[in-house]
Amino acid sequence: MIRIILWDVDGTLLDFHAAEAAAVRSLFREFGFGECTDAMLARYSVINDSFWKRLERGEISRPEVLTGRYRKFFSEIGIDPEWASRFNEKYQLRLGDTIVYRDNSLDIIRKLRGKVQQHVVSNGTVIAQEKKLRLSGLGELMDGVFLSERVGAEKPNIAFFEKVFQEIHADDVCKPGEILIVGDSLTSDIRGGINAGIRTCWYNPKKLLLPEEYQIDYEIRDLNEIFGIL
């Protein structure tokens, strides 16, 4: 029996790429950079993902992610990389303006409220995630919100999960096998769940192949499948 669900946000409960595209495009206009094309956005997403994965591996710091991704992106497309810091500051606020639910995530969280404990576990910045959770209505339905910037460790680091378990008094409530993490990222959510010794549920709407090095408990293509697991 699952008693606690740890939910990832970006790419799981909310469509991160929709919010990312809207934020970057609007800021390009605001900064006078011209049009941010689909090709530019695709390249930025690749760069952004690579920087976050380096953070997950402990290779760089969070500030190096937030400004470094834009310095690299801007350098590649002919924009002065000195704009990176100012652009990132506005991006953090703008990112939370666009709310697109994955599947019908808000209804799912609402239906599960009171039946299991539900907590957000995210590596996203405090500024961006708190705005998203407030505007989406997801935050008020959760039993807790754990953002790595505040926790002091990133998923998949075991220290992140130890802090979460300590805060929610997990040892008093359930066994590790009764805690489930649900997320789209193998390197962050699933690897983190494995490191923490809890059950893992890979949200895989794109039907990607699971690499052999990952041993997962569940795989879902639609968030509504979570009811069959519980």
Image: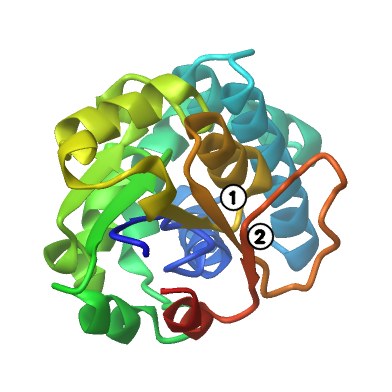
Q: Amino acid at mark 2?
A: Cys
Residue 141 falls in image quadrant: bottom left
Q: Residue at coordinates 58% horizontally, 24% vertically from top-left?
A: 55
The reply to whether residue 55 is in sight is: yes
Q: Amino acid at mark 1?
A: Phe
Say left or right for 125 vs 54: left
Say left or right for 25 vs 208: left
The answer to the question of whether label 2 and label 1 lie on touching residues, with beta carbons closer than 8 A, is: yes
Quadrant occupied by the C terminus = bottom left
- Name the secondary structure under disc 2: loop
The residue where tag 1 is placed is 33
The residue where tag 2 is placed is 36
The reply to whether residue 80 is in sight is: no
Residue 103: x %, y % from top left = 49, 84
132 up-or-down from 90: above or below: below
Q: Residue at coordinates 30% horizontally, 38% vertically from top-left?
A: 147
> How far apart are labels 2 and 1 at the CA level?
8 Å
192 up-or-down from 211: above or below: above
Residue 114: x %, y % from top left = 13, 72
- Name the secondary structure under disc 1: loop
Q: Residue at coordinates 65% horizontally, 32% vertically from top-left?
A: 53
